[in-house]
Image (cartoon, rainbow, N blue to C red):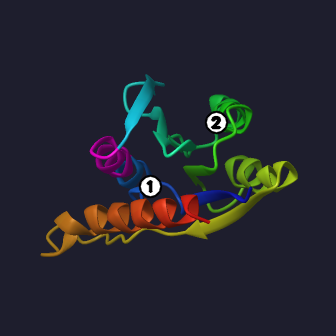
Amino acid sequence: MSKYVLCDTATSDCGKTQTLLKVIERLQLIADHEEIQINEVDKFAIFQINNNIIVVETLGDPVPDFNEYLMRAVEIEAKVIVCASRASGYSFMDVYNLRDYEYEVIRFSNFYSQTDNLPCKPFLIDDMAQAVVQLALKLLAL
């Protein structure tokens, strides 16, 4: 069985968490799930789709719990892990190290603009979340 990590990789304050929260919202519409509220913002969600597991972890900053939740996803044999990491440092390396568990790491950067009044800004995160969900579902079929 092929296993994948889809990792939103960027510096701080680029919308990684918001994008992954939208991924969770979209997957909730099509799959049963369990959800753990990690802190005020971050979540760890497990989705069961056709006997496969997709995990979405919204922690992306280098915090002690980051790797713990990645390892939970590995332990439950998630076929697809969707997560975020900084562009370098500890969280970046934690994701990279999932290759030791035979995960193929696919990195992406979400759509982002620093211009607050950009007319398309409201749908940048939503469109990226939709693309991530579509890719995750295609990977389940492989």
What crowding class fits label 1: few (fewer than 14 Cα within 10 Å), some (14-19), or many (20 or more)? many
Looking at this view, name the residue that lies furthest to the front: 50
- To which quarter of the image does residue 52 belong? top right
Q: Is residue 28 left or right of residue 10?
A: left
The residue furthest right is 100
Residue 57 image position (x, y, % from top left): 52, 41
Q: Secondary structure at mark 1?
A: helix
Query: Which residue does the image show at 72% across and 59% down from the upper left?
Result: 2
On screen, residue 5 above or below 41 = below
Quadrant of image for the C terminus: bottom right
Residue farthest toward the bottom in the current orientation of the protein: 119
Q: Residue at x 71, y 52 (%)?
A: 95
Kindly identify which residue carries mark 2: 66
Helix, strand or loop for disc 2: helix
Q: Marks 1/2: CA distance?
A: 14 Å
Magenta residues, dominant SS class: helix
Closer-to-camera residue (28/90):
28
Please check the rendered image and state whether residue 4 is part of the magenta-colored stretch, yes or no.
no
Q: Residue tagged by mark 1? A: 16
Front one among 112 and 96? 96
Q: Is residue 128 above or below residue 49?
A: below
**What residue sits 55% from the left and 50% below the top?**
83
Q: From what the image shows, is residue 136 above or below residue 72?
A: below
Determine crowd level at label 2: few under 14, some 14-19, many 20+ residues with C-alpha closer than 10 A.
many
Name the side, left or right, on which 76 lies relative to 46. right
Going from the N terminus, do you reach mark 1 or mark 2 first? Answer: 1
Q: Compare residues 106 and 79 and report the one nearer the observer.
A: 79
Asked if residue 114 lies left or right of residue 87, the reply is: left
Locate the N terminus and report the quarter of the image it occupies. bottom right
- Region of the chain picked out in magenta, as a range: 21-30
